[in-house]
Amino acid sequence: MPTVMPDRLTEIAVTLLRCAGASGEEAEIVARHCVGANLAGHDSHGIIQIPVYIDRVGKGHIVPGAPIEVVQESPTTTVIDGHWGFGYVVAEHAMRLTIEKAKTANIAACTVFRQSHVGRLADYPLMAAREGMIAIMTADSGRSPKHVAPFGGRAARLGTNPISIAVPSNLEAPLFIDMATSAAAAGKLKVAAARGVPVPEGWLVDAEGRRSTDPRALGAGGVLLPLGGTEGYKGYGLSAIVEILSGLLTGLGFGVEPTGRHNDGCFMAVFNVAAFRPLETFRQEVTEFAQYLKDTPPDATTDEVLYPGEIEYRRSRDRSERGIDVEDATWQQLQALARQHGVAQKLGLDG
């Protein structure tokens, strides 16, 4: 399994995406998000996704250069049609627009439909946190194939339906949450399968409804379980609300349509902290609250207590210096794509 420095991985991603038809700007945005996910330790949303996106471009499921259309808006709300563009590009645009509206109106919200995969959800609320705002974002996969069973079920009815919230602070590492409402993101099983390793007990059941640790079971009729283990009804309930915000409120609907086209629906809301509290006072209190949490004596299984978002920052710092481990299966896919497009030698992928 090769270890690759972030700059080189970014160059590989940008070059391959441009070969597939993405513009320079689109390729750089997608690559930045993917490599950023690897840096944060979320390999399921990292470079492993580049071959998937290139395949979707070839099938017409992603449309490079697609227009981003505002189909309905008010001073505080926006509805955006991404026309099947790269989800990263569309979602960044939507969040910037929502932030600008919140600067004027103090609270703003947006829904987005007909866009491809948006990747690691935290990237977008963190844009608002850097502007002194609190942001929440939810996403689902529209009516594309599902992977998650409702609590007590064994057939897929829901997406992994993530939710992310970020807040401003004076902390070195930003404070945020970013989580699937399933036991794990489907991409984590893809990474585990590529690396030939089992997944933890309680993540999924096989086609017969039996608990399994084999990540390949997901592609053989198995399903992911909702977040929460024996209290999975909590993750199930949260997932259903995410589906309503990101699927029904966007107009994408629920269930599965036969095309299999991935269609991330998103809901985002931004709150201007200064409309509620002096921003600097709030930043400092969040910082002190995080330290209060960190001062908790650790239990027997840990060395220290971290605040939400701190582990991603530490991983990013470490991987920026050490490099990113890329599973052999993904590396071979990147090599094959480079050879296909005649850029293997240029990218050093001809070995």
Image: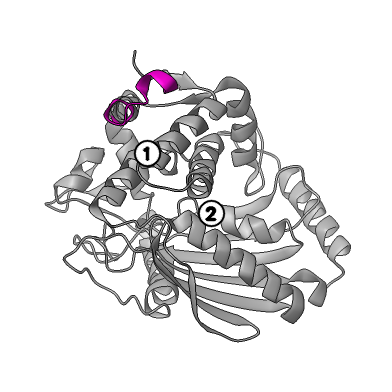
- Residue 297 seen in the current view: yes
- Which residue appears farthest toward the left when viewing the image? 208
Protein image colouring: one colour
Pick whichever, 98 or 326, lies toward us: 98
Based on the picture, tell me whether residue 341 belongs to the magenta stretch.
Answer: yes
Look at the numbered discs 2 and 1 and tell me whether their residues touch, using CB distance below 8 Å: no
- Residue sitting at x 14%, y 46%: 220
Q: Residues within 10 Å of mark 2 (few under 14, many from 20)?
A: many
Mark 1 lies on residue = 19
* Residue 241: % across, % down: 43, 74
* Residue 163: % across, % down: 50, 62
Range of residues picked out in magenta: 337-347
* Residue 64: % across, % down: 39, 54
- Residue 167 seen in the current view: no
Pick whichever, 76 or 133, lies toward us: 76
Q: Is residue 327 left or right of residue 277?
A: left
Q: What is the distance, in whole Å, between disc 2 and disc 1 at their CAs?
A: 32 Å
Q: Secondary structure at mark 1?
A: helix
Pick whichever, 146 or 32, lies toward us: 32
Q: Which mark is residue 321?
A: none
Identity, as a three-letter code, of the amino acid under mark 2: Asp
Pick whichever, 108 or 236, lies toward us: 108
Mark 2 lies on residue = 178
